[in-house]
Image (spheres, rainbow, N blue to C red):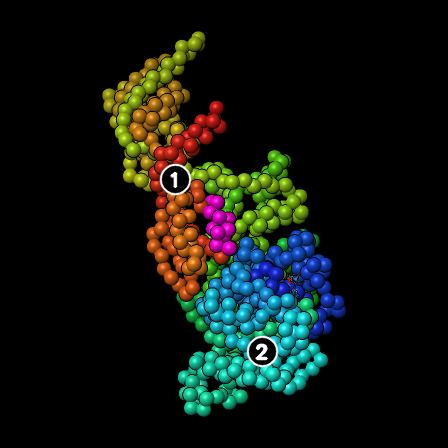
Amino acid sequence: MKEYKMSKLRNLLMMGAGGSGKTSLAEQIFHLTKTTTRLGKVDEGNTVMDFDSEEIAKKSSLSLSLGFLNHKDHKINLLDSPGTPDFIGDAIVAIPAVENVLLVANATGGFEVGLELAIEQVERKKVGKAVLVNRMDNEHADFYKTIEAIHENTELNPTPIQLPIGREGGFEGVVDIIRQKAIRPSGEGDVPADMQSAVEDARLALMEAVAKTDEELSNSFLENMELSEEQLLGGLKKAVAAGEICPAFCCSASTGVGVMAFLDGVCDYLPSPEDANPIQVLKDGEAGELVATPDGELLGYVFKLYADPNMGDYAYVRVFSGSLKSGMDFYIPEKDAKDKAGNMYYMLGKNRQDTQEIRAGEIGAMVKLKNARSMDSITAVGSKLSMPLPELPTATYWQTIRAANQSDEDKIGTALQRVIAEDPTIRYELNVETHENVISGMGEQQLQLVIKKLKNRYKVDALMKEPRIPYKETITGSGESQYRHKKQSGGRGQYGEVFFRIKPTERGEGFQFINSIVGGVIPSNFIPAIEKGLVETLEKGIIAGYKVVDIAVEVYYGSYHDVDSSEMAFKIASSMALKEGFKKCRPILLEPIHELTIIVPSEYMGDVMGDVSTRRGRIMGMEQRGKKQYLNAQMPVAEMYFYYPALKSFTQGRGRFTQKFSHYEKVPDEVAAKVIAAWQDSDA
Ligand SMILES: Nc1nc2c(ncn2[C@@H]2O[C@H](COP(=O)(O)OP(=O)(O)OP(=O)(O)O)[C@@H](O)[C@H]2O)c(=O)[nH]1
Ligand SMILES: [Mg+2]
């Protein structure tokens, strides 16, 4: 495999709505650059990038894949991410691995949610961004409208550097407005006469945009009302690398028109790893910069784990600085662990090409890693460098998961760990309150895919269902109780009697046990049994089967029997006294409340606010950011578990939220009554 200089590499992550044509575009690129010998189709299930059996069945990408190609002596690494919002995690983790995010827009799609979510991930980041308006051959395709919609709805400022020639079925080429050439599959030519003025306008707009990014250029532009060729090109490349100008292209992945011109543009205008220097890193945990070179200090980043059913786990790696060689020991600062680089490859979908090293600027894959996982940095042993962690969205969808057959119970744990390691937005944990295994992530499709993978790859049938709400029980008043446990049924009897004072404590204090027994009315060796009886009962719950919290129980009097008293007898007495006393102390249920930030286009704000209050939520504040409203709200978990599908449905998919635990709060009486009744039914 040829080694490329950093300046000849381009790393491109494709993001955008599902169906905008990313996978088809990759396929056409591989075909036109003769990387492959045959043009596959997503609908026929034979593309390079959608090779996984679930992707073939769905006719849509479900996980990030890698490819590479040579164009005009440059190597372009292509990363194809899924556009379905549930699977956005892969792209988010891959953004730090590239210099360029290519936002693929559908020329007929209006402003699509998947595109909006993708843009939201990059619009404020320093990473290079470009827009490619695809499906230009389609009926109703409109390049200008698509660009306008992005302007209107986001902070991204796509600036055309190529314009389409012809429309819909007649889309036949593009004009490069910098070089002022028409580029058709048949070759280069002059700008069509009827496009002269459009090209001039676009060129002026581009010059203006470039001039705005640099004071010297700005002065020069004001003086001459234009920029020289050299100023324009130099300024453009610098501004694109800094993420300040977003060049826009157009093409049809189906017909291939515009695709080669776009690749030319990638080589000519988009930043190489060298141009992206210095890179933002952490040095000993503090923000710093590193000038990345092939002979510098080793720094890499794992941006994807792919569990190949036959070949084991692949870790996809970007190397920023230095060189990662096969067989080399390396260090993972996030884990304070060592690992060893196994065999290395450049991936083209599922096909691999051997390499002995992955050098600065390159993207490749390794197998047989012991410790490295997604988002881990790779450094030399003893290094202080690491990559900043990408910020992942919080969960918006929750389910419990368990094996359908008891015999699979041992297997499901390990299988699940492997499946979810592929998607960084999925979390899986035991909820200690409800004793349920809860799996959470971005949405139903994502978790359904987990179930399918468990079945297909590991032959484990798994079931999901709605999680229980981790309510808690507590009291709002004080009271006293007394219980005598006495049994005389032949042989040795049972005897124990306790007197309790019960009162609530501050929220969050848990359980307090106070022993005020004096004069030996209960011998001290039985006191631990009394406490144990309390703890066990509190754990199981009294009125609705949920853990009891924030309660103080004082044992102040009692009696015993020389022969019949036992630890067991006192435990029972204690439990019974607590149950009786608890009901006298005005018990209530507490429920977890989460803090949500709900992000919606402003026009949906009224609907969202109304809906939040029907879900017993509270709006705590709001803020306009760009074209969107950020609403801070509090909402009970009982409502939040099912909130996302509803929010999506009345915002045409454009609303989303992030959340975190806030506090426990009293459940309103009418809701509590239902929860209590449900428990009594299930207990009966
Ligand atoms: N007419 C036309 N159809 C296209 C074009 N590009 C893609 N398509 C079709 O659009 C559909 C979706 O294409 P994909 O390449 O799977 O889209 P994607 O962006 O990878 O979608 P996700 O993987 O779900 O994010 C397929 O039926 C393609 O044949 C194009 O340029 N013109
Ligand atoms: Mg795809």
Question: Quick one: 162 or 25, which is closer to the camera?
Answer: 162
Residue 144: % across, % down: 55, 73
- Residue displayed at 34% across by 55% down: 621
State the residue lying farthest toward the right: 37
Amino acid at circle 2? Gln
Residue at image mark 1? 591
Amino acid at circle 1? Glu
Magenta part of the protein: which range?
A: 641-652
State the residue lying farthest toward the top: 490
Give the image quarter of residue 6. Answer: bottom right
Crowdedness near tag 1: few (<14), some (14–19) or many (≥20) residues, C-alpha within 10 Å: many
Compared with 480, 114 (above or below) is below
Report the predominant secondary structure element of the magenta stretch. helix
Crowdedness near tag 2: few (<14), some (14–19) or many (≥20) residues, C-alpha within 10 Å: many
Compared with 486, 633 (above or below) is below
- Quadrant of the rendered image holding ligand 1: bottom right
Residue 442: % across, % down: 52, 52
The label shown at residue 162 is 2
